[in-house]
Image (spheres, rainbow, N blue to C red):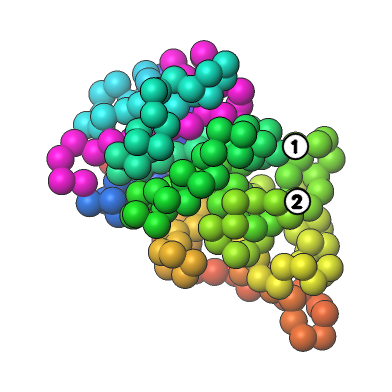
Amino acid sequence: MGLNRAREPWAPGPVFGYAIELAQPAKTPKLCVITTAGGDQAETITRFEQAFAENDVELSVLALFDRPSVTDVSEHLRAQDVVWCDRGSLVNLLAVWRAHGLDKVLRECWEEGVVLGGESAGSLCWFSASTTDSFGPVRPHHDGLGLLPFANSVHYGDRREQFHDLLADGSITTGYATDAGAGLHFEGAKLVTAISDRPRAGAYEVHRGPDGRVHETQLEVRRLKRA
C-alpha cells in the first residue's frame, strides 16, 4: 500500500489522501517522505518528487545519507502533517534512525498528532516486533520503535509461519498482519480500521491464547477509493 510503481511516473495511491484527511491541515498539506530504508537513493527521491509534482501537497524528502538533507531534523518533521516512510531494510532503517535520534523525534511527532505511515519496512518500524528479511531469510525481529506495543507482519501470505512463531514464543501476545495492498489505521495504540487499495487484500488480528496456541482472525477491511 502506497505508490503504484508500475506507472510512469509513479502514482500516489489513495492512502495518501486518507492520511492527509486524518491530519486535517489548515492549509496546503505538508508531506515528508523518509527514504532511509532504501539507502536514500537519488532515483527514489526523484521518483517521489515526480509522483507528487501535480498534487496539492508541499512535499519534502528527508534523506540521512551521507548527511541530513535539512538543517534541523526535529523541527522539520514536527512541522509536517504527514510523515511517510518508504520501503527497504527495516534493520538498517532502525539503526540509522537511532544514530540520528529519529526514534525520539518521531515519537514526539506521534504524540503531537503528526500522522505517521509507511510501506513495508515503513509500516513495520512503528511496532514493537515484526518479521523481516533484512538479514536474508525471513525471521522474527523484536527491536522496533514500539509506538504500537504489538507485532506486525507485512507480505503476510509469505510470512505467516514466521509470524506465528514470533507470537508462539510468548514475548509478544498480540499482532496484526496485512497482505500486499492492505494497511492498518491506529489512533494512539487503538486499531480503528483496516484499509486496502485493491481487491482481496486482507488484514488479520493474530494472538497467543492462554493455551499457548496462536489464533488468527480476519478483519473487516475498508476499501479506499482512488481519486
Which mark is first along the chain, 1 or 2? 1
As drawn, 104 above or below 214: above
Q: Dot 2: few (<14), some (14–19), or many (≥20) neighbours within 10 Å?
A: many
In the image: residue 90, left or right of residue 105? right
| Residue located at (54% from left, 58% from top) | 147
Query: Which quadrant does the C terminus fall into?
Result: top left
State the image coordinates of residue 33 (x, y, percent, origin top left).
43, 32
Q: Residue furthest left?
A: 27
Is residue 153 visible in the rendered image? The answer is no
Circle 2: element type: strand
Q: Residue at x 30, y 39 (%)?
A: 79
Q: Amino acid at mark 2?
A: His
Q: Is residue 180 left or right of residue 49?
A: right
Q: Which residues are magenta?
A: 25-48
What residue is rendered at 41% in x and 64% in y? 187
Is mark 2 in CB contact (under 8 Å) with mark 1? yes
| Disc 2 target residue | 141
Left/right placement of residue 95 relative to residue 4 reads: right
SS label for mark 1: loop
The correct choice, above or below, for 93 with respect to 222 in the image is: above
What number is the disc on residue 134?
Answer: 1
How packed is label 1: few (under 14 Cα within 10 Å), some, or many (20 or more)? some
Please provide percent x and percent y for residue 156. Answer: 68, 53
Note whether residue 76 is visible.
yes
Q: Find residue 31 and report its image quarter.
A: top left
